[in-house]
Amino acid sequence: MKIAMVGAGYVGLVTGVCLADFGHDVVCVDNDRTKIEALRRGEIPIYEPGLAELVKANVAAGRLVFSDDLAAAARAAEVIFVAVGTPSRRGDGHADLRYVHAVARDIAASVEGFTVVVTKSTVPVGTGDEVAAIIAAANPEADVAVVSNPEFLREGAAIEDFKRPDRIVVGLEDERARAVMNEVYRPLYLNQAPLMFTGRRTAELIKYAANAFLAMKVTFINEIADLCERTGADAQQVARGIGLDKRIGPKFLHAGPGFGGSCFPKDTLALVKIGQDNESPMRLVETTIAINDQRKRAMSRRVVAACGGEVRGKTIGVLGLTFKPNTDDMRDAPSIDIIRGLLDRGAQVVAYDPQGMDAARSVIEGIAYAESAYAVAEGADALVLITEWNEFRSLDLDRLKAAMQVPVFVDLRNVYRPEEMARNGFHYVGIGRPAGSVRADQAEAAE
Ligand code: UDX
């Protein structure tokens, strides 16, 4: 099939290259010329494992090209995917559909023959109707079916997720689009991925409901972890104990510093707005957002408590800045709030992240950066592990301790075992575990 992918951001790039890898002819279009030129030189603007190699192979095979000529791409395409950004609108939290609408207007004039227009961007319920109306108004001759095909990729595992999805959701109103979408995803039948056809509005809502549900699940175990600390229970065992129940499932039950990233914070907020607009309040989701915001701030109090109630003049080393491992994405990363809290209390902060330091420099001011975990430990009064990168999982504890001024280790991802850390002479603080945890009330007392 001839496919145009509009928007060479995270979702567009990953989806475009994976569809090319399926054997389709894909042109990735973006109006950022510099980005297109860089992509043509083989430079990938984001860090995602396996992406650079896959781009290279598909460009070499002639199945993937980059262009800034949307009109030409739309004219030639049988399917046009719209994967432009839908950031939170400043002030009100609604998804900002400016870019989606602009693309609809731009392609309306250029499409030739029956064309399926697929929204990949996460958009509020009813956006497909709007896109169809914009195209019809701009070009009454256009023969277009607008489809919703939400994306469930996780950063850091996006290619694997694309090739082995749990499901593919396709929302359509025009039956002609069904055969086309079947053809687009045909290679995935080999992996037996269920292709689920729904109405367009249903597909749009599925994306928000999925992300909000997962955000609630993480937030639930985070609150349980707080309760574990107060009651002497172990949150990791609680997670295992409930996760073995198939109705609950083991995933998304790792307690941590709170969720971040480009999707959960934005999509939970947008779902709350959709609920308000439709007089159907999303109360669990509203509460989830509030708990998560508080939690990120509470994590710096936990560090202060672990340091004996005072961090003024102390050097705190931070391991990991990105919102999760295997990405360079800093959007809504818990590290931002945690570090701000530490700086406000007069600490000096030195940080290291395997991929996120460039992005971090523009969002976190007033901290120093180091080139490795051991360099961060040099002279530190405490280490805080915020992102569970693999390279932080097997640190040389003796070397770390020898480098530090005071061996305090705050492990916000429960990467290490409390007994092991105690044996190695660390004052260790994890999340939701009896040994070596700071109880929530102690952390508050440190305020
Ligand atoms: C998410 C969804 O998983 C994906 O389907 C959707 O398309 C986009 O949003 P992503 O934001 O890449 O993907 O990250 P994910 O791995 O889902 O993690 C989200 C956040 O939750 C991270 O901050 C992560 O650290 C946190 N998390 C996740 C936990 O704290 N504990 C867990 O058990 C799982």
Image (tube, rainbow, N blue to C red):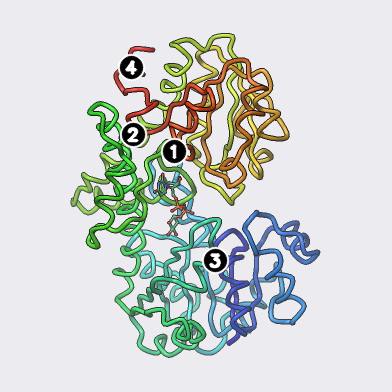
Judge depth for marks 1 and 4 and give the one in front: 1
Where 382 sits versus 179, above or below? above
- Residue 158 in the image: x percent, y percent? 54, 63
Give the mark, 2 or 4, whose residue is nearer the N terminus: 2
Q: What residue lies at 62% left-to-right and 85% top-to-bottom?
A: 23
Q: Is mark 3 within 8 Å of ligand 1?
A: no
Which residue corresponds to mark 1?
414
Contact between labelled residues 3 and 2, with CB atoms less than 8 Å apart: no
Mark 3 and mark 4: Cα distance apart in space: 53 Å
Q: Name the amino acid type tagged 3.
A: Val
Contact between labelled residues 4 and 1, with CB atoms less than 8 Å apart: no
Which residue corresponds to mark 2?
432
Which residue corresponds to mark 4?
442
Give the mark, 1 or 2, whose residue is nearer the N terminus: 1
Mark 1 and mark 3: Cα distance apart in space: 44 Å
Q: Name the amino acid type tagged 2.
A: Gly
